[in-house]
Image (cartoon, helix red, strand yellow):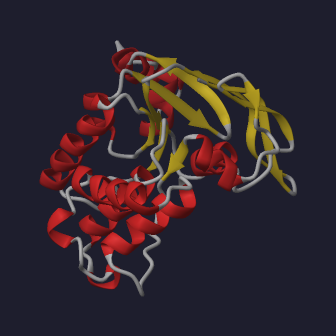
């Protein structure tokens, strides 16, 4: 479905993404973790087309999209949320979803209206359908980010810390919503610092450190990796090995 090969991105002397390679299959659900500044959000911006890579290649369903603009990637089936919600303050929840269906997925008329309504229902915002976006709580703004992405009818959904700032109960509600999205056959790549949410949901976990892929595999195996312990616990190599044992 998605193939990333040797991707690189540099800002001046800072190498943010360094020779990054990743393959994603149909309906696959992958989590991405890493310390702050590891390059996780930059990776999403490269996949979605908001920024251009300095090296490497991105392929979507066998076609090279490395230089494809973001609106065409969205129309092709790549949707994303943003770490910091970006609501349209002058619009309601429904109007926001309708804009995504109309301009993100290129729908018209009844199809766009039905898609917007369905996205709102999926994300748990049906009761807030006519609420101005500026009046939403943090939880509902996170759900609005998801609504807007779902309204583009993605085949691949990129979630950037959609659980950040939520309570345990709110995280559990979010996981139920995402389970419904997953059941529809949407592939998901989820960046999150709340590791327990990822390990409860994803089938594969990727760790990024300093722009490079450090580990990639089953969540339990990755979380037992001494190198991962070293990143998250500040242990040296010997201590990390003992902690993982």
> From the image, which quarter does the N terminus lie in?
top right
Farthest residue to the front: give it. Answer: 109
User: In the rendered view, does 232 fall on the left or right side of 214?
Assistant: left
User: In the rendered view, does 35 fall on the left or right side of 242?
Assistant: right
Residue appearing at x 51%, y 50% in the figure: 80
Image position, residue 15 (x, y; %): 79, 46
> From the image, which quarter does the C terminus lie in?
top left
- Between 65 and 111, the residue placed more toward the observer is 111
Image position, residue 78 (x, y; %): 56, 42
- Between 162 and 164, the residue placed more toward the observer is 162
The answer to whether residue 217 shows anywhere in this view is yes
Looking at the image, is 114 positioned above or below residue 66?
below
User: In the rendered view, does 140 fall on the left or right side of 45?
Assistant: left
Image position, residue 6 (x, y; %): 78, 27
Residue appearing at x 26%, y 67% in the figure: 140
Looking at the image, is 24 positioned above or below residue 141?
above
Residue appearing at x 47%, y 20% in the figure: 226
Residue appearing at x 32%, y 32% in the figure: 184
Dividing the picture into quadrants, the one containing residue 181 is top left
Count of numbered circles in the view: 0
Looking at the image, is 177 positioned above or below residue 56?
below
Looking at the image, is 242 positioned above or below residue 154?
above
The answer to whether residue 234 shows anywhere in this view is no
Dividing the picture into quadrants, the one containing residue 88 is bottom left
């Amino acid at each position: 479905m998605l193939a990333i090969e040797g991707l690189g991105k540099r800002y001046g002397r800072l190498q943010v993404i360094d020779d990054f390679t990743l393959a994603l299959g149909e309906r696959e659900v992958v989590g991405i973790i890493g310390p702050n500044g590891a390059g996780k959000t930059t990776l999403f911006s490269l996949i979605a087309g908001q920024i251009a890579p300095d090296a490497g290649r991105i392929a979507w369903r066998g076609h090279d999209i490395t230089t494809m603009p973001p609106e065409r990637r969205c129309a092709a089936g790549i949707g994303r949320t943003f770490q910091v919600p970006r609501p349209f303050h002058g619009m309601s929840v429904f109007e926001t979803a309708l804009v995504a269906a109309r301009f993100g997925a290129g729908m018209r008329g009844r199809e766009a209206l039905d898609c917007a309504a369905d996205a709102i229902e999926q994300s748990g915002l049906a009761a807030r359908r006519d609420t101005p976006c500026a009046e939403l709580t943090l939880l509902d703004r996170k759900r609005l980010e998801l609504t807007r992405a779902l309204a583009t009818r993605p085949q691949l959904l990129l979630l950037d810390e959609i659980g950040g700032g939520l309570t345990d109960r709110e995280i559990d509600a979010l996981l139920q919503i995402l389970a419904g999205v997953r059941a529809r056959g949407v592939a998901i790549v989820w960046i999150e610092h709340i590791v327990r949410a990822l390990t409860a949901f994803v089938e594969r976990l990727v760790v990024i450190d300093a722009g490079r892929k450090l580990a990639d595999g089953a969540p339990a195996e990755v979380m037992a990796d001494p190198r991962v312990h070293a990143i998250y616990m500040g242990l040296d190599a010997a201590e990390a090995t003992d902690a993982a044992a």
